Amino acid sequence: MTDELDDLVVLSDFAWERLRDRLTGLTEDEYRWEPVAKCWTVRAAGDGTFTADGHQGTYRSAGETELFTTLPWRLHHLTVVLGEDRNGRWLRVPDAPTAVTEPAGTAEDALARLADAYAAWRTLLTMVSEAALTEPMGEVAGPFAESTGRAFVLHILDELIHHAAEAAMLRDLYDAQ
């Protein structure tokens, strides 16, 4: 592993460990808490599965109102970001691990899926080549074709760090009520 890749893994581990520690003791009531009306959250689909509001592609459409997202939504979003199969394709690691990215109905399941997604992300990150970090990702990355693998890794780390901070804030708000 190069020094640069090692730095990215160290930062990723630091952000993950901080989030994992902040989620210790998460209860079902806290997991289900909706602090404001009309939150985006994870809901029962009626067939034994769950669905995440507005998570068809994780991006809001043009003109769509910014909605408050709950802890289950944020944890699901992180699970998708860390565990989805595009990560390996975009970073040129054909046999990259992935994780189950369906929304979880319980805090325990959400935490387990998030941990599995992080494990997949970390393993993938250690498999990335120097060329994949420094060269444009190409056609496979669609509108991000000209972005380097490094830029993509930094984007994933930004997602991990900022959604982890939001999850921590939600826990603080829940405790303060």
Image: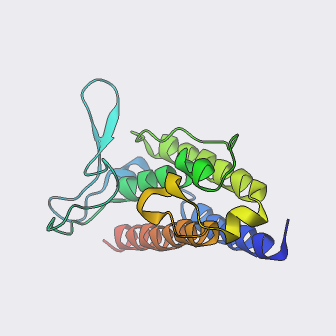
- The residue lying at 35 percent from left, 56 percent from top is 58
Q: Position of residue 120 (x, y in %)?
A: 66, 48
- Asked whether the viewer can see residue 136, the reply is yes
Give the residue displayed 35% in from the left and 30% down from the top: 49
User: 55 or 52, which lies in front?
Assistant: 55
Q: Position of residue 71 (x, y in %)?
A: 38, 59
Indicate the position of residue 26 as horizontal and vertical percent values.
49, 55
Q: Would you place residue 134 above or below residue 97 in this image? A: below
Q: Quadrant of residue 5?
A: bottom right
**Image quadrant occupied by the N terminus:** bottom right
Quadrant in which the C terminus is drawn: bottom left
Q: Quadrant of residue 22?
A: bottom right
Q: Is residue 107 above or below residue 30?
A: above
Q: Count the labels in the image.
A: 0
Q: How is the image coloured?
A: rainbow
Q: Which sits in the foreground, 45 or 94? A: 94
Q: Is residue 64 left or right of residue 80?
A: left
Name the side, left or right, on which 19 lies relative to 133. left
Q: Is residue 84 above or below residue 10?
A: above
Residue drawn where x is 44% and y is 57% of the image: 142
Do we see residue 30 in this rendering?
no
Q: Is residue 95 left or right of residue 143?
A: right
Query: Measuring 25% from the left and 61% from the top, which residue is drawn there?
Result: 60
Viewer-closest of 48 and 175: 48
Q: With 4 as the anchor, is 105 left or right in this view?
A: left
